[in-house]
Amino acid sequence: MTHRFSAIRAVWAGSTVLAAAAFGLAAPAAAQDEAAATEADGQLATIIVTANRREENLQDVPVSADILDAERVTAIFSATADITALAGTAPGLNVESSNGRVAPRFYIRGLGNTDFDLAASQPVSVLLDDVVMENVTLKSFPIFDVERVEVLRGPQGTLFGRNTPAGIVKIDSVKPSHDTSVNAALSFGSLDTFALSGAVGGSIVPDVLAFRVSAQLQSRGDWISNGFTGDENSLGGYEDVAVRGQLLFTPTERASILAAVNFRDLAGSSTFFRANILGPGNNNLNANYDRDTVFYDAGGGNKANYQQFGATLTASYEFDGATLTSITSHWTSEGSSRGDIDGGFGAVFLPGGGGPGLIPFPSDTQDSIDLKQTTQEVRLASNGDGPLSWQVGGFYFDSDFDVSTVGFTFPPPVTVNHTNEAWALFGQVSYQLTEKLRVTGGLRYTDDEKDFVVLSGAAPQPRSVGDENIDWDISLFGDVTDNASVYAKVANSFRGPTIQGRDVAFFSAPSVAQSENITSYEVGFKSELADRRVRLNGAAYYYTVDDPQFTAVGGAGNLVQLINANKGEAWGVEMDGAFQISPEFLVTLGVAYNNTAIKDSTLAVGTCFQCTVTDRTVTLGGATRALVNNNPFPNAPEWSGDFTARYSIPVGNSGEFFIFTDWVYLGETNFLLYESREFNAGSRIEGGLKIGYAGDNGQWEVAAFARNITDEDNVLGVIDFNNNTAFVNDPRIIGAMVSVKY
């Protein structure tokens, strides 16, 4: 790849600086933290969450949550996976993308959005260090050097950002401290997979100014051949570089200022669509499917190139009784991706045999974005120990971006502009009614305005939408015993109206969806048993969505139409468990069942060109439409779950051999609004394994790893407009890694 070695040299130079700092500055840690000490005693470590914008024990918070710690995150991304690898790592969470390593789509409890446009709105919010990553390209920022990833299930509309009716994925990076720390990791794997990461931090001025710099390089060589051109191993590679720098200034014991910058440079591949690999008449991968080969006559190599930059300033001051916090952030995202969307070439077969079958008409498109996003939050929160705790604040959001679509067989190119301005006021109060019972309630008022206009390539076609809404929630949390609690929660949240303009590039008008509003009812329990060696948390929920926003994608016209259904309903149960079987053996298990249904007896959507539709159909305006009443939400598997196990064998006083395995499961999934025999997936399972040795109390480690260890061929999504095209998961990656930490 053209940029690969320059980026490796840049990051390698950075790692050399980190290594020098390690030898010149670092000393072994003097003590273990509380969690490690607890684990050494054979008990489960305390899990900290920030679901209420303050650090609390997970067992004391009325929310269904799953926490991915640093070890789990390292395992998930050990083979240079992108953020979609979070799919299934928490029960009820699904993540997928048809835009390669950018523009992921998140779903929690079945609620999400299948829109593949770069202007798509989603009901799952992603936050990086308390800053909302609203645009889909920002949601793809790499996860590295993190303290934890929190998956908060259910509406979170009171305290967080915007567009959270389904939930939140909250990413918290490791912050600067005055304790000198250095870590670095290097891994190599099959398919020329390479990763290098590191971080260094410590004092610049003792107790006053601290820093932390971290970086990551992920790359893979080209491994997919083009059967149409005969070029072997010519596609599929990428290089993804990300850097974070932070300064923490604490002039007094009461004041702190944290400045952070984030940067990413991606040069790689878009999603590889594979023509006619499903059915027909079933959802099985057929003889056209070869994971190592595509048949492209277009797509320009399926290239994706993106640059992202973010700067955030977080300032806080502790008054007597309350803490004032301000978070100011500005992000930019610029880049493009191009793909052979039909997944093949026009002929039925290549001379001499082979080829992906009939392509009725070609589709080769490129989408690009130039985005600026600014957010400002001010929050005042109580910091006392009394029975009453509270917080109030305000939030401002502004984004402005251009999206350009080039249909290489449909000139001219079209550029559209989206602007979005929103502001909100919010507050939350929690009161300890009795020694064992606490009540919490919150309100948030939001005003959300969006504007759209065509800048070039077509008529202006302006659109403007806006709405204002009050989100609210109330919960009761009661201690049944010292180690068991129950809670009940009712919450209401909304996602603002949305404008979709990509169809302008294909001679159709923009589409608009009005706000959706969710009301959720949830009961749950938290428990720690067997002297804190077993943790069992569970929840049951039911929610309704008024005017749910869905996206009718594809169909014979290959359009992206926003629609509102009359109503959506879902109910389900979730269970998270952790079992410290011995000080050396830890097992975690999570499972969720989620039943979703579209409730609209008149809603009819376009269907595929050559698949087998199983819904009742009607003819409207001369076109066939499928009635989708009672169909499940798209990309909403009924069953999902995850499993991890870690076993270690102590060696001497400071070393251990260990084995760690993690597995995710996503059950049967319908990919689109309508149902067909082809465009759905059966049960999908993927696992990982890591075996190694850690020495000096974890200060260094060598290990072998594998991702997708059973080499599963899983369909992740489909393209339905002119053939039975789909895209699949990554193949098995086997590698070795070494890491040091001081």
Image: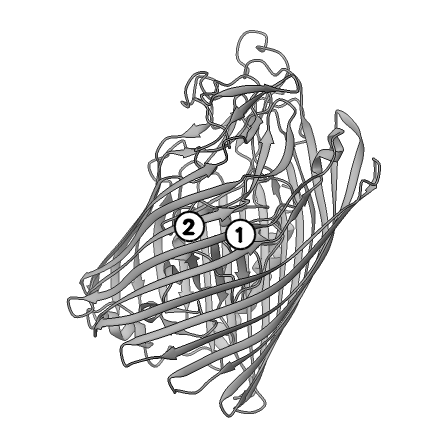
Residue farthest toward the top in the current orientation of the protein: 352
**Residue position for label 1:** 517
- In which quadrant of the rendered view does residue 245 lie? bottom right
Mark 1: give few (<14), some (14-19) or many (20+) Cα within 10 Å: many
How far across and how far down the image is residue 598, in percent? 47, 37
Q: Is residue 315 above or below residue 399?
A: below
Res 151 seen here: yes
Q: Secondary structure under badge 2?
A: strand
How far across and how far down the image is residue 463, in percent? 76, 45
Mark 2 touching mark 1, by CB under 8 A? no
Q: Secondary structure under badge 1?
A: strand
Q: Which mark is residue 543?
A: 2
Q: Separation of disc 2 and disc 1 at Cα?
A: 10 Å
Q: Is residue 320 above or below residue 95?
A: below
Instruction: Give the mark nearest the N terminus, 2 or 1.
Output: 1
How far across and how far down the image is residue 317, in percent? 57, 86
Q: Residue 656 versus residue 397: which sits nearer the camera?
A: 397
Res 79 seen here: no
Mark 2: give few (<14), some (14-19) or many (20+) Cα within 10 Å: many
What is the tally of numbered marks visible in this picture? 2
Q: Is residue 29 above or below residue 190?
A: below
Residue at 28%, 71% in the rendered image? 478
Q: Quadrant of the C terminus?
A: bottom left
How far across and how far down the image is residue 460, in percent? 83, 41
- In which quadrant of the rendered view does residue 692 lie? bottom left
Is 242 placed left or right of 455 in the picture? left
Q: Quadrant of the N terminus?
A: top right
Q: Amino acid at mark 1?
A: Asn
